[in-house]
Image (tube, grey):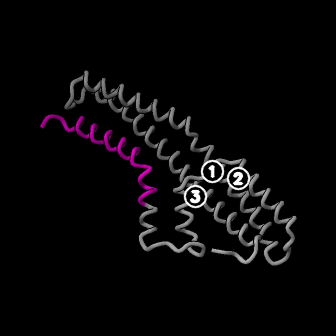
Amino acid sequence: MQKENHFEELYDRIHKTAACRFFANDRLKAHHNASLWTITFFSMGLIFIPLLQSFGLETRFTSNYTNFIQVVLAIVILVISILLNMTNFSVRADRMHQCGMILNSLARKVHRHINEDKSGGSYESLVKEYDAVLQRFENHSPLDYLFAKNHLTSSYTNPWYFPAYTRIRYAGQFLPYIALLGLETAWFSMLVTGNA
């Protein structure tokens, strides 16, 4: 969409980028929470197995197999903990939020110039400020752009299926967590049902 003046175009770019950064913040927080819940449930599994054994409850699997699964659970917890530490979801989410807040402040500054000032000097300084903010922070993912595009209906014309497509893409990134928790749940349900 072509804007009437450079300030309006810059405002539009900043507004869209800020929306993407806020969606990135939400997405990264969701990853952080999903990782923590996965670690929590696997840790509960590690506690649950020795409790079954210490109370002498009958299980479907042999002691050796149950011990093997305990080791697998411990390895999964270790791997997820390392990945969580490496990806730094929480810190990255905070940085995305901070970037979004700075961009919102800059957007307000640019918006004041839309109807007032047409001078090239102030425009160039605002563009440089925008570029400096972008260089200070990590970029958002294409998925964050899709979410912003889905929600900024005044700026984009999306096909009818776009909201569902965006949500499916969003949910798809959480499939590894769901698969791990599903496997653990299935294994524990088989463990405690006993031989039928």
| Residue 130 located within the stretch drawn in magenta | no
Tell me how far mark 1 sits from mark 2, CA to CA. 7 Å
- Residue drawn 71% across the image and 70% down it: 9
Identified at 32% across, 39% down, the residue is: 184
Which one is earlier in the sequence, the residue at label 3 or at label 2? 3
Label 1 packing within 10 angstroms: few (<14), some (14-19), many (20+): some
- What x and y, as percent, mark residue 27? 53, 53
> Do the numbered discs 3 and 2 sit on residues whose CB atoms are within 8 Å?
no
Q: Please state the horizontal and vertical placement of residue 109, each as a whole percent of the image.
A: 80, 66
Frontmost residue, 110 versus 9? 9
Q: Are marks 1 and 2 in contact (CB under 8 Å)?
A: yes
Corner quadrant of residue 7: bottom right
**First-in-chain label (1 vs 3):** 3
- Magenta region includes residue 172: yes
Chief secondary structure of the magenta span?
helix
- Density class for disc 3 (Cα within 10 Å; few <14, some 14-19, many ≥20) is many
Quarter in which the N terminus is drawn: bottom right
Q: Which residues are magenta?
A: 168-196
Q: Between residues 34 and 124, which one lies in front from this camera angle?
A: 124
Which quadrant holds residue 60?
top left
Q: Which residue is mark 2?
A: 134
Pick whichever of labels 1 and 2 is earlier in the sequence. Answer: 2
Give the Cα distance between marks 1 and 3. 12 Å
Q: Quadrant of the C terminus?
A: top left
Q: Is residue 22 above or below residue 51?
A: below
Image point 59% across, 76% down: which residue?
Answer: 154
Residue at numbered disc 3: 23
- Name the kind of residue labelled 2 in the image: Leu
Q: Which residue is mark 1?
A: 139
User: In the image, 124: left or right of 41?
Assistant: right
Q: Amino acid at mark 1?
A: Asn
Please state if 103 lies on the left or on the right of 24 as rendered. Answer: right
